[in-house]
Amino acid sequence: MKHFDFLILGSGIAGLTFALKVAPRGRVAIVTKKDRAESNTNYAQGGIASVTSKTDSFESHVQDTLTAGAGLCKESVVRTIVGEGPARIAELIALGMKFSESAAPSKDGGKQLDLGREGGHSERRILHAKDVTGREIERALLDAISRQPNIEIFENHIAIDLITSQKLGYVGENRCLGAYVFDKKGNRVWTFAAPVTVLATGGCGKVYLYTTNPDIATGDGVAMAFRAGASIANMEFVQFHPTCLYHPKAKSFLISEAVRGEGGILKTLDGREFMDAVHPLKSLAPRDIVARAIDSEMKKTGADCVHLDITHKSAKFIIERFPNIHQTCLRYGIDITREPIPVVPAAHYQCGGVVTNLDGGTDIAGLFAVGEVACTGLHGANRLASNSLLEALVCAHRAAEKILSAPLPKSDFKIPVWQSGSATNADEMVVVAHNWDEIRRLMWDYVGIVRTNKRLQRAQKRLANLQQEIQEYYWNFIVTADLLELRNIAMVAELIVHCALQRPESRGLNYNLDFPGANPAWSQRDSVVRRGS
Ligand code: FAD
Ligand code: SIN
């Protein structure tokens, strides 16, 4: 049993930001399932959207966010997050974050930050560190954390489930008391008790066969929160990034939207600029539109990918602005300064999640959710590029402020230690691997960019069978990280299908051929799901 004042699950931008803010007020545990930097954050390329230029305005950023969100964003949330962005960016810089600077000096002759452009933004407003923004964010935050004696990081520890008063049989308000955590190297389960638990576990790209996300993104936070009784919303809005590198040996390598922001053009394999006929912003249209257009071109032509061409820019510019993309593609034999990049859409971002207010509060007392795991209302039916890191920064700060504004609750609940199944059966591990593959493929085939009710229902039936098998397996055998993640992706897959079946319309990222248009009765209506509902 381990006791802390703050238990944070996840060490991406959301978890680390929150940890730094609360550390002066108590002992903090950060539990993270791989190495401390391994997170979606670490792979972020494009940057952080925020209004920092004199020619930009909050109103313009707000309107771009609302337009991308296709009528489902909560406007007050959008205004708050956009408005508080610059202060959080200034704090990040003060912590040591190094954003790329513009070659041109400002009007007063000083240095100014370089601003990138991405799809759906009507202004250049993306602060970035070349094309490795996330790596630099993790470096800066982890450096700052290493100077904080109150923070302990538990690497290779995977949270299994939240501990709640209701699950323990107490009546009254449902309160989160901590979490059971599997120590992968020590091969044992610890009980972490804390009056404040923060889910900062990121998204669920691994639910799909093809994704830009690293292996950690298995939707654990949403699955744990759902099992604990929290409300989950808008899981049907899975964002597919239009341009993931297509190469048999490349696993999940993103080609940043910033490449299109700097003039990259999408073309069919025979060189046709197909976005011209689709949207006035052409290759820089909002992501849902670009991803669907690529999907449609690939289906029409039978091609395995499309091309993204930036060869009209100078080699010097490309190498300086996109050093990581240039180097990585070279390793796969593609010189992006001379030839187009083969790309395909892939699952990228979870717009829905655990329902929270702007301060990370969920409907379970003592449980907070920040970052990609949360559904605040900022993204609506489709996230505007580079708004995710912004949301995580702003909401982690707000959650910390809110929590620190009152004394931490005292708890006299008795928490039992974890009871484990006792069986091991190496032969049966094949079941885990098989089910894992089956879920990811069926989600790709039946619950992808273009959906129909028939395919969703087919997915629902298969997932129900798989769930039964996984549940039996889970209770009988000693836990492993693979089994825990399988249980979570199965749960999250079910939630995505459930939410998609609730929504009788096409809106933003939820495109259903049975309901080709938006239904006004569903504008401003979230698809909410709760255990037992
Ligand atoms: P993450 O950074 O994903 O961190 C989650 C953490 O939780 C990890 O440490 C993980 O190990 C841990 N974890 C998960 N489950 C458990 C568990 N059960 N137990 C213990 N620990 C657990 N957004 C932008 O705004 N701009 C961009 O330029 C951008 N580029 C992107 C590029 C790529 C390739 C990807 C994949 C995403 C990109 N995004 C971008 C999205 C953005 O990076 C993420 O939404 C954001 O980083 C999420 O931050 P987070 O802190 O919520 O979660
Ligand atoms: C990218 O660089 O294209 C990713 C940006 C994002 O997901 O916000």
Image (cartoon, rainbow, N blue to C red):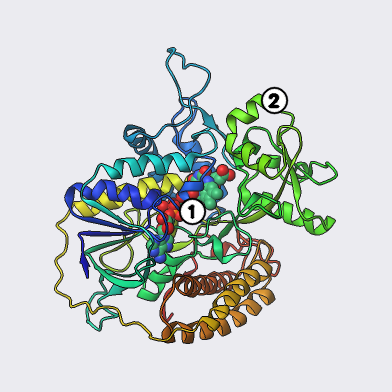
Percent position of residue 386, x then y: 51, 44
At label 1, which amino acid type do we have?
Cys
In the rendered image, the quadrant that contains the N terminus is bottom left
- Which quadrant of the figure shows ligand 2? top right
Asked if 133 appears above or below 376 in the picture, the reply is above
- Residue named by callout 2: 314
Q: Give the alpha-carbon distance from disc 2 to disc 1, as whole Å.
A: 39 Å
Give the tally of numbered discs. Answer: 2
Percent position of residue 351, x then y: 51, 57
Asked if 319 appears above or below 426 in the picture, the reply is above
In the rendered image, the quadrant that contains the C terminus is bottom left
Residue 249: quarter of image: bottom right
The label number, if any, that marks residue 520 in the structure image: none
Percent position of residue 395, x then y: 35, 50
Q: Earlier in the sequence, mark 2 or mark 1?
A: 1
- Residue named by callout 1: 73
